[in-house]
């Protein structure tokens, strides 16, 4: 299916919210990982979200140059073309963009989408994340308030982060401490600034102990029940239905099935997956190289085996490994077998 239209993306999110499940949102940085993501969604019969960070976009553009907006648009155009061959719908998203990268990442992409929409086309991306976790909440929401109507006019959904995700991603790091937990007051401030959909739809990454990367059991203390406390408080204050905020789960690698299920019950409809899929992509390559090293290397005057060191040989193993992990995520999140294209 073609990449989701704004209407299809909204339908995906609505289906997740009403159905009590979440879509996997998979970070990619190459054509191979894009293929892996779509393959994984297709194997699970699940729609899904493919996303690129500013670092991933830098890499897609060519690691010797700095052209992240160009890399992101190249990603979008590639995904648009290859997705047509699959029977599930994918949406495209840009991940964490802190304040210092707005001018080189989200804003030029938004401008490119605005021009494309004016010409009768679709936006390059169905959603963009503004990550204001490193600035005071007031400034975070002021910037979000400026971005929201502009994105809404282009048919794009805004994602905001209210709180701090610990750990490190793309060189942006935060300590693991008590600041990793959002509060009801944070939720109220978000609604007061951005509304409840009347100014434009947005996704909210509340934090409940989330940490980027992967840690041994006990290294991270998740409190998914905190999401219910905030959602219930907002419902009571504003007289809305259950789970008024559309929530995103960041930093979920290594989370237990019970923690994921509780977060989804409390309104998570999008769960980011990066560290686990990076490992699932790379691990089969290591296995392939160890098992076939004598054919990959030109040892003792031999010429090796071109069929083995051809990047397509180990690349297929990598893509299949990552796809399998994504299909498992769809099963865990309840999105398997659910597609707006069905």
Image (spheres, rainbow, N blue to C red):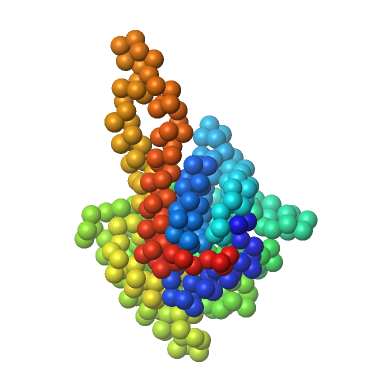
Residue 217 image offset from top left, x and y in percent: 22, 58
The quadrant where residue 155 appears? bottom right
- Above or below 24: residue 57: above
> In the image, what residue occupies the spot 32% across and 28% down?
292
Residue 192 image offset from top left, x and y in percent: 54, 78
The quadrant where residue 250 appears? bottom left
> In the image, what residue occupies the spot 43% across and 33% down?
313
- Above or below 24: residue 305: above
Numbered circles on residues, count: 0
> In the image, what residue occupies the spot 51% across and 35% down?
63
Q: Quadrant of the C terminus?
A: bottom right
Farthest residue, direction left:
218
- Above or below 29: residue 90: below
Residue 80 image offset from top left, x and y in percent: 62, 51
Left or right for 69, reference 236: right
Left or right for 93, reference 258: right
Residue 333 image offset from top left, x and y in percent: 39, 66
User: Camera-side residue: 256 or 289?
Assistant: 289
């Amino acid at each position: 299916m073609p990449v989701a239209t704004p209407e299809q993306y909204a339908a995906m999110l609505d289906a997740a919210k009403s159905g009590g499940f979440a879509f996997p949102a998979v970070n990619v940085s190459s054509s191979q990982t894009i293929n892996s993501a779509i393959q994984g969604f297709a194997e699970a019969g699940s729609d899904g979200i493919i996303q690129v960070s500013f670092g991933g976009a830098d890499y897609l553009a060519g690691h010797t140059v700095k052209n992240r907006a160009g890399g992101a648009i190249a990603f979008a155009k590639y995904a648009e073309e290859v997705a047509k061959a699959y029977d599930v719908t994918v949406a495209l998203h840009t991940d964490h963009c802190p304040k210092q990268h707005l001018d080189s990442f989200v804003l030029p992409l938004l401008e490119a989408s605005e021009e494309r929409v004016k010409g009768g086309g679709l936006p390059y991306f169905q959603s963009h994340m503004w990550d204001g976790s490193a600035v005071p909440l007031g400034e975070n929401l002021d910037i979000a308030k400026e971005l929201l109507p502009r994105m809404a006019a282009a048919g794009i959904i805004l994602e905001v982060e209210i709180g701090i995700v610990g750990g490190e991603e793309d060189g942006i790091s935060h300590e693991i401490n008590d600041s990793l937990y959002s509060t009801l007051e944070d939720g109220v401030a978000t609604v007061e600034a951005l509304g409840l959909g009347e100014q434009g739809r947005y996704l909210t990454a509340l934090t409940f102990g989330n940490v980027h990367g992967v840690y041994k059991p006990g290294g991270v203390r998740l409190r998914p029940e905190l999401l219910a406390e905030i959602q219930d408080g907002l419902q009571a204050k504003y007289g809305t239905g259950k789970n008024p905020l559309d929530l995103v789960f960041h930093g979920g690698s290594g989370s237990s099935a019970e923690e994921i299920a509780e977060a989804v019950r409390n309104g998570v409809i999008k769960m980011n997956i990066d560290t686990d899929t990076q490992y699932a992509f790379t691990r089969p390559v290591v296995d392939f190289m160890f098992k076939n090293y004598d054919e990959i290397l030109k040892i003792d005057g031999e010429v090796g085996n071109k069929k083995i060191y051809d990047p397509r040989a180990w690349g297929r193993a990598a893509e299949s490994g990552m796809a399998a992990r994504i299909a498992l995520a769809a099963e865990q999140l309840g999105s398997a077998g659910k597609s707006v294209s069905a």
